[in-house]
Image: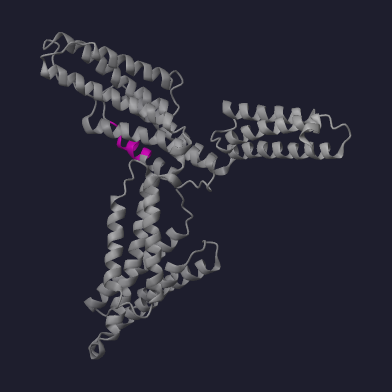
Amino acid sequence: MDMGNQHASITALQEIQRKVKDTEKNVSTFSGLSNDPEYKKLENALLRHLFDIESIDTDGKGHILQARKRATEETERILKELENNANHPCRLEIENIFKEAQRLVAQQMTPFFGGGKGIPEEFEEGIQNILMRLTQVKTEGKSSLRKARYRTLTKVLCVQEILENCLKKTILSLPLSTEAHPSVSKINSVMCEVNKTRWSLIRLLVGVNDHETYRHLSCVLSGLMADLDALDVSGHTEVRNYRKEVVEEINGLLKYLDEEEEAQMTSSYDLAQNQSILKIEELRKRMKEIRSVVLERFHNLSDIHMGTKSELQGLIAQLDEVSAGRNPCIREARRRAVVEVQAVIMYIDLREALERRQHAGDQLNTEHASHAAVWRVLSNLSELQKDVLSFDGKRADKNYMILEELITKQLLALDAIDSQGDECTKAARKQAVKFANNILSYLDMKTDEWEY
């Protein structure tokens, strides 16, 4: 159709659709709940677009009617996506965990707020437990869920670090007498305000401080910094160092306010683009290549094991060097990668031991019968581990259940072996049980659908 002669209703529809597309960008990354102001804003915008679409006059023309219908369906789809984002089970799980953090702060902070008491151990343990549970929430690759989880993690991580800093040096002490210098009294006063602000920040981070805002706290801290900068402490090293210590405390708290702003950025919550994650994935890729070669040489590893094991150990060393910072998701990704490498090394070690045993010859004739029984189980476990290493399914898969059952049967076979007092058998059986449990744990880890 000649654009110059395009019907006015089609032009109007196209303009509305452009606005709908702009709104969709915000909907796709919306990480809040249905009672958030941003949700209402997006919902109202989409409903307004729907009203505008329905108001388009079709003049009884079929192609305009179809275009209006498509525009309506697209807008309704985006409206449904907004609703799903806010009510997704994983999003609600994140919110429920965060509410536990709120209850924990509300319960534990009141008793020692401003009282100079120590931080309760259950408070620290509770925060750590909340962090671990947040890392286990699935995001299904959805930007909205990743953003919600990242923002919540950021807040709780800030709380954890503030608590850790308090434990390292408690609340700042009063190192100098007011008689040492006229400025000491002012520094002491600022320090007391910093201590109060620290607890206000913790409560604000978890949303239990209705009378405070990030902007106001930032202004308060900046004002305290200005008060310290205005003091003349030249020629008094002790007083200058004291002021420096309080300044460092203020800068530390301002850093947490900056991280709250950072958590709003799209680039920060997309861990798939994180440099540490990219490095971990690079090392995992190499591990998988080595694993494929090892599994192909199932019956003869003797000619490759030295260089292979050395490289695998090198991968573990490189993983140890990957910086996880304070992000538990990156720490968990690194830990799981190390476990994957260790599983391959464990498989190679057992295959080597079984090959050496095959060449033992007459030495096996004097072996205790129960000891030989343990080695038969280990041989079976080696074959099962090969299947586990190559397994790439889910827990609901039939093969998973078969593998789990077969490994459990080998554990039962080990329990049934009577060592008859033979110490070598006892030690071998103990190691075999540990080996079987490690295989089961690795199988569980491969199929728990964890994601960063």
Q: Is residue 415 above or below residue 311?
A: below
Q: Which residues are magenta?
A: 119-127
* Residue 260 x %, y %: 41, 30
What kind of secondary structure does the magenta stretch mostly adopt?
helix
**The quadrant where residue 349 appears:** bottom left
* Residue 297 x %, y %: 38, 77
Q: Is residue 9 above or below residue 337?
A: above
Q: Name the residue rendered at 41%, 35% in the picture.
A: 154
* Residue 217 x %, y %: 38, 19
Q: Is residue 87 left or right of residue 349?
A: right
Q: Is residue 116 left or right of residue 152?
A: left
Q: Name the residue rendered at 29%, 73% in the picture.
A: 305
Q: Name the residue rendered at 36%, 30% in the picture.
A: 108
Q: Is residue 418 visible?
A: no
Of residues 108 and 356, the one nearer the viewer is: 356
Q: Is residue 115 left or right of residue 73?
A: left
The N terminus lies in quadrant? top right
